[in-house]
Image (cartoon, rainbow, N blue to C red):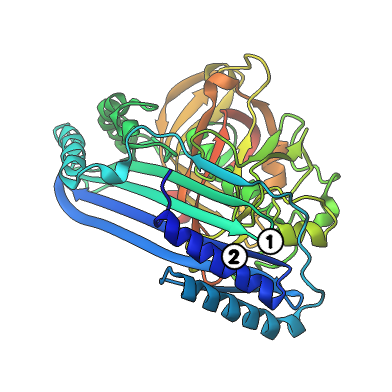
């Protein structure tokens, strides 16, 4: 596999950086060279509105010196610059060392030698010509706009090709390639009375190539054919009566609840207060490890950097740690956190589970989310229809939309794309203006049943933000359909005073 730059230049940069790190006495040092190509294409009502093709190339050096971290990055990739970055990083470490309460110690990690890894794809999406992208999005837009009642359509696709090279003083040398893609269409309908509703496709972003848009892994033709009627039904649906309902939640919606109330809440740096200035802390503090009843006994949550087609899947993280699968919640009890090497060592938790990542060669690696997923029921498990059959009065929730959660990842509110009333175990048509609201522990403790493997979906997002300056990472969350009892439902129209 080729790298972000040619092999001779990579070798020269590696030798210059690691030799300089050894000379200054760094106890740990790693050099990263990355090329990240990002393409975005947007059509509005079938006409090209935006086309972006951006490539970022650079090198970054992170080291531990004087008991503190140091980092420096540059858009120049050459041996003299690499040696200079080591000096700048060591200088930064010396400056910050007096402010540290205790010196940085990294959890042990064995060297992994030479590693080459690529996410599975057949057709690199950034190599697909722009006219071909526009043609497909135009065809999809045309189909929706031809349907009665559709007034506007926005079609979007984002594709990323990321080549990352890492070498450290331990002897790990890794070349990794991640390819990912996110297509999305949104249709809007306006009634004669001036009321309006919009609806998006449910196809999740994935670690795949252009073959995904050609039907490998998702039936786009079927979804586009069904969307106009779904939207028309939503526009004429009655407004929900606020109250307490049992919810059957589809994985197309539940993944976001997992992301916000479990994924972020179990980042150990956040749980220890290190993210307080920007995106908050976490109620799931370290004193709850092994004792906090996070959810019901049906709740089994894992962090996984190895998930096939996962957006956060890698072979080696940005601290040279091999990808792993690890428990976060077992039988409803908080059983683990997402870790990087420094925080794992500081808390006596043993080895890091590989959750360090930087979104750019110019950014320092920080603790980032793995693919955090809720396991389906063992064996065949119940279908979504069987979960619905167990509800007398409830709502079936499909697709994600808006969300809100407090600074401790505890009080939250989520909406969705479609909501179906459930009466006596049967779906009774759509309702509108639904938001469900709960605390994290009340919600997950109320999860009575999880669906089987047949209901499981790997969904996720390209735009998970964290840190100052902010970094953006892609992450997946797998989950089945679930049944959650006694959840408060708001009428969003009434809450907005309309």
Q: Is residue 84 above or below residue 159?
A: below
Q: Can you say which quadrant of the picture contains the N terminus?
A: top left
Relative image position of residue 315 (x, y in whole percent): 58, 43
**Quadrant assignment, res 380:** top right
Which label sits on residue 270?
1
Using the rendered image of the protein, determine whether residue 256 is visible from the camera's viewpoint: yes
Q: Can you say which quadrant of the picture contains the C terminus?
A: bottom left
Q: Residue furthest top?
A: 380
Q: Nearer the viewer, residue 189 or 398?
A: 398
Which label sits on residue 279?
2
**Quadrant assignment, res 282:** bottom right
Q: Are marks 1 and 2 in contact (CB under 8 Å)?
A: yes
As helix, strand or loop, the secondary structure at mark 1 comes to helix
Residue beneath the point at 34% across and 47% down: 159
Q: Residues within 10 Å of mark 1 (few under 14, many from 20)?
A: many
Q: Nearer the viewer, residue 244 or 360?
A: 360
**Quadrant assignment, res 330:** top right
Side (left or right) of 220 relative to 284: left
Residue beneath the point at 81% across and 62% down: 346
Relative image position of residue 477 (x, y in whole percent): 55, 39
Relative image position of residue 197 (x, y in whole percent): 30, 44
Q: Is residue 297 above or below residue 102?
A: above
The answer to which of marks 1 and 2 sits earlier in the sequence is 1
Nearest to the eye among marks 1 and 2: give it.
Answer: 1
Side (left or right) of 374 relative to 191: right
Using the rendered image of the protein, determine whether residue 250 is visible from the camera's viewpoint: no
């Amino acid at each position: 596999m080729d790298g972000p730059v040619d092999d001779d230049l990579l070798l020269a940069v590696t030798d210059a950086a690691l030799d300089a790190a050894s000379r200054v006495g760094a106890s740990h040092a790693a050099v990263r060279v990355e090329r990240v190509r990002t393409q975005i294409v947007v059509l509005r009502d079938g006409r090209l509105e935006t086309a972006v093709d951006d490539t970022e190339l650079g090198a970054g050096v992170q080291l531990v010196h004087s008991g503190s971290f140091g980092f420096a990055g540059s858009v120049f990739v050459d041996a003299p610059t690499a040696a200079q970055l080591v000096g700048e990083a060591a200088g930064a470490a010396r400056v910050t060392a007096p402010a540290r309460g205790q010196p940085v110690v990294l959890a042990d990690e064995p060297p992994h030698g030479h590693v080459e890894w690529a996410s599975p794809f057949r057709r690199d999406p950034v190599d697909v010509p722009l006219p071909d992208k526009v043609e497909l999005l135009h065809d999809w837009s045309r189909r929706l706009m031809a349907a009665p009642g559709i007034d506007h359509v926005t079609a979007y696709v984002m594709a990323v090709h990321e080549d990352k090279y890492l070498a450290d003083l331990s002897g790990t040398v890794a070349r990794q390639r991640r390819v990912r893609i996110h297509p999305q269409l949104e249709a809007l309908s306006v009634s004669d009375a001036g009321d309006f509703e919009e609806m998006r496709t449910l196809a999740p972003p994935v670690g795949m190539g252009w073959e995904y848009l050609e039907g490998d892994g998702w039936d786009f033709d079927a979804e586009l054919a069904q969307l106009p009627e779904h939207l028309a039904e939503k526009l004429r649906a009655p407004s929900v009566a606020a109250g307490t309902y049992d919810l059957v939640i589809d994985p197309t919606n539940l993944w976001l609840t997992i992301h916000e109330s479990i994924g972020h809440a179990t980042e150990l740096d956040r749980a220890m207060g290190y993210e307080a200035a920007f995106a908050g802390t976490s109620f799931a503090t370290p004193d709850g490890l092994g004792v906090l009843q996070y959810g019901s006994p049906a709740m089994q949550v894992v962090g996984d950097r190895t998930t096939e087609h996962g957006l956060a899947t890698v072979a080696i993280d940005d601290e040279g740690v091999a990808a792993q699968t690890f428990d976060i919640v077992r039988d409803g009890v908080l059983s683990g956190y997402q870790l990087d090497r420094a925080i794992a060592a500081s808390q006596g938790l043993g080895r890091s589970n590989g959750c360090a990542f930087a979104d750019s060669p110019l950014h320092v690696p920080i603790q980032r989310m793995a693919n955090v997923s809720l396991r389906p029921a063992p064996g065949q498990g119940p279908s979504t229809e069987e979960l619905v059959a167990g509800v007398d009065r409830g709502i079936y929730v499909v697709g994600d939309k808006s969300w809100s959660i407090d600074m401790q990842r505890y009080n939250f509110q989520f909406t969705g794309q479609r909501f179906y009333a459930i009466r006596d175990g049967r779906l009774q048509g759509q309702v509108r203006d639904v938001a469900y609201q709960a605390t994290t522990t009340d919600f997950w403790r109320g999860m009575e049943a999880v669906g089987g493997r047949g209901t499981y979906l790997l969904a996720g997002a390209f735009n998970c933000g964290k840190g100052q300056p902010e970094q953006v990472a892609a992450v997946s969350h797998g989950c089945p359909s679930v049944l959650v009892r006694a959840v408060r439902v708001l009428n969003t129209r009434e809450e907005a005073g309309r």
